[in-house]
Amino acid sequence: MENSYLTLNETRQYKQGARRMKKVNNKEYEEVVYENALELIEKYGIKGWNMDDLARNSGLAKKTLYAIIGSKENLISRLFLSGMLDNKAAIEKIISSNKTNKEKLEILFNDIPKRFSGFTRRFAKDVSIEYPLLKKELKQKDEVSHEIFKNFMDDCQKDGIIREDIDIDAYIILTHVFFDALIMGDHSDSDFERISKVFMDITMNGLVKR
């Protein structure tokens, strides 16, 4: 009769696997990983650390770390995607408010420079250099926010707030080009916000019907 009992080594492997799965499915461990990843990025940039560093800082085995996040590239993608989702939620909150479309437009234009500051803006350049395919993927995912903004701009034009001779699609492309170029420069958060605010003020004055 074949012995159905697990050997001592198999029992240990089973318990280790079970503990690892608990960590993989535990949101608290994910938060620990994300927080430590952000600390490493802030300290060393996108390139200056590896998964060994993250595993050590997070107090996790490397196998468990890979099971939680998949890869370094996947982790960075999630961090940037989180920022993009925050921006999308902020835009939707402004657009869905009870204010008039003109008031919403003014709030959006004041808010946009702030949306580009912080972690996402500071490390977007490094991501575009180190992970060009990831940059392309993130840009595609960000199209939802762009579409929401475009639809709102179209509504403002129909309401007579934005001049009828303005090409909304061309304006949005121009805005993307401006911010892409600004992001690729080496600006402090305060300079970035100041320059982008000047751009948004100028375009706002040119867009709105007087």
Image (cartoon, grey):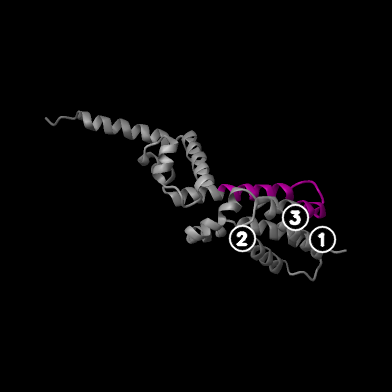
**Residue 5 image-quadrant placement:** top left
Q: Are marks 2 and 3 in contact (CB under 8 Å)?
A: no
Q: Are marks 2 and 1 in contact (CB under 8 Å)?
A: no
Give the mark nearer the N terminus: 2 vs 1.
1
Whole-angstrom CA distance, mark 2 to mark 1, is 37 Å
Give the mark nearer the N terminus: 1 vs 3.
3
Q: Which residue is mark 3?
A: 109
Q: Which residue is mark 1?
A: 159
The magenta stretch is 82-108
Whole-angstrom CA distance, mark 2 to mark 3, is 21 Å
- Residue 156 place in picture, x, y as percent: 78, 60
| Residue 131 makes an appearance in the image | no
Q: Residue at x 35, y 41 (%)?
A: 63
Of all residues, the one furthest to the bottom in this rendering is 165
- Residue 139 place in picture, x, y as percent: 56, 59
Nearest the eye: 141 or 65: 65
- Residue 7 place in picture, x, y as percent: 20, 30
Q: Residue at x 85, y 64 (%)?
A: 209
Amino acid at the residue labelled 2: Gly
Q: Which residue is mark 2?
A: 185
98 magenta-colored = yes
Q: In screen coordinates, is 9 left or right of 191?
A: left
Whole-angstrom CA distance, mark 1 to mark 3, is 18 Å
- Residue 59 place in picture, x, y as percent: 42, 34
